[in-house]
Image (spheres, rainbow, N blue to C red):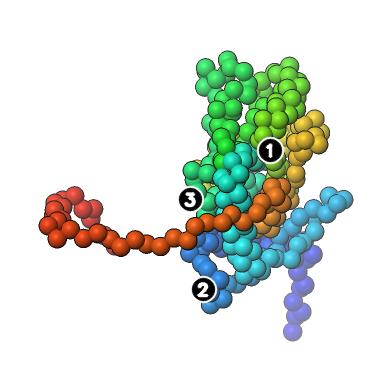
Amino acid sequence: MTKRKAPAKSQIKKSVRQLKAHLRLRDEIIDDLDEELEMELDDGRLERLDISPPAPVQKRDTKGKLIEQPPLDRHVYFRELFRLQAELIKLQDWVVNQKLKVVVIFEGRDAAGKGGVIKRITQRLNPRVCRVAALPAPNERERTQWYFQRYVSHLPAAGEIVLFDRSWYNRAGVERVMHFCTEEDVEEFFRTTPEFEKMLIRSGIHLVKYWFSITDEEQNRRFQMRLHDPLKQWKLSPMDLESRRRWEDYTKAKEDMLSRTHSKQAPWWVVEAVDKKRARLNCISHLLGQLPYLPVAHPTLALPKRKHNPNYSRHPIPQKMYIPEIY
């Protein structure tokens, strides 16, 4: 009877990598489903829901080495998310009550998870109070303006929160790396930005700046997911793909940006974003700590009795005006 040859170490390592990739793919699909569940669940239904644990993820330690991080229990994730979103509503009420002006900047590489965090912040807030500013590339006229001019029009009035999904820091990142501006433009940006942000703060604006940090390997994985998922392909542009090729250029630009625009008045805060769920919870929790707020008393509400007019009768709506009931 012949002995079966033991698999080579390289084959074992390959199989382990494939298994981990499969588990991460499964976790990505679960994460998409969670986006729908987040709006539907409450604590009672959460207890009755059969939720399988996610796959482990990798992050870098203080020396830059990749280590495996234990998965965050999804019951814990949902419960903490709901709790933090309840606190965000209290913060929103305080901002309105005190007529505060809040700007939160979200920067980071493509696919770093900025949009996911923004979505969870705004999910249960009043869009008239908390809005998102995600500006497209400047047009011909805007390119001739003072660089900060098109961002100023999106700044908040009293009682408003504005979340910038990318911001004036485009100049220090994508514009610099892709050579959409000159190095002289970049130097002028670094000279002007600290003064510009001091002006915002002196005017009464509360400014919070976040950089979402992911590893080279994690960005590659997320791009691969988007390439092969028809529901996510719209998230990838030719610019995103080019940014993948220029990873090291973006790293140098990021390091320069953080060192030259970090200040006591307007500090940068780095969010470890390899684990999406942890990044969301950590960022929201930190944001709540940046603005001391108190509960706002609301008047007790009661539904009034509806008036009935015996002489009124509803006019029939033509059947052709109704949409087809396919489902």
Residue 275 or residue 55, whichever sits in front:
275
Tell which tag, 3 or 2, sits nearer the viewer: 2
Residue 179 x, y percent position in the rendering: 67, 23
Q: Earlier in the sequence, mark 1 or mark 2?
A: 2
The residue under the point 73% across, 19% down is: 188
The residue under the point 75% across, 44% down is: 269
Q: Is residue 10 left or right of residue 80?
A: right
Where disc 2 sits, the SS reads helix
Residue 48 x, y percent position in the rendering: 53, 77
The residue under the point 21% across, 60% down is: 308
Q: Earlier in the sequence, mark 3 or mark 1?
A: 1
Q: Which residue is mark 3?
A: 231
Disc 1 to disc 2, C-alpha distance: 37 Å
Q: Which residue is mark 1?
A: 207
Image vertical order of residue 61 relative to residue 186, above or below: below
Residue 89 or residue 285, whichever sits in front:
89
Q: Residues within 10 Å of mark 3 (few under 14, many from 20)?
A: few
Tell which tag, 1 or 2, sits nearer the viewer: 1
| Residue 85 at least partly seen | no
Q: Is residue 225 left or right of residue 322?
A: right
The furthest residue to the right: 63
Q: Earlier in the sequence, mark 3 or mark 2?
A: 2
Image vertical order of residue 275 relative to residue 107, above or below: below
Locate residue 75: give its quadrant.
bottom right
Q: Amino acid at mark 3?
A: Leu
Locate residue 10: give its quadrant.
bottom right
Q: Residues within 10 Å of mark 1 (few under 14, many from 20)?
A: some
Q: Amino acid at mark 1?
A: Leu
Image vertical order of residue 75 relative to residue 182, above or below: below
Q: Residues within 10 Å of mark 2 (few under 14, many from 20)?
A: few
Q: Which residue is mark 2?
A: 45
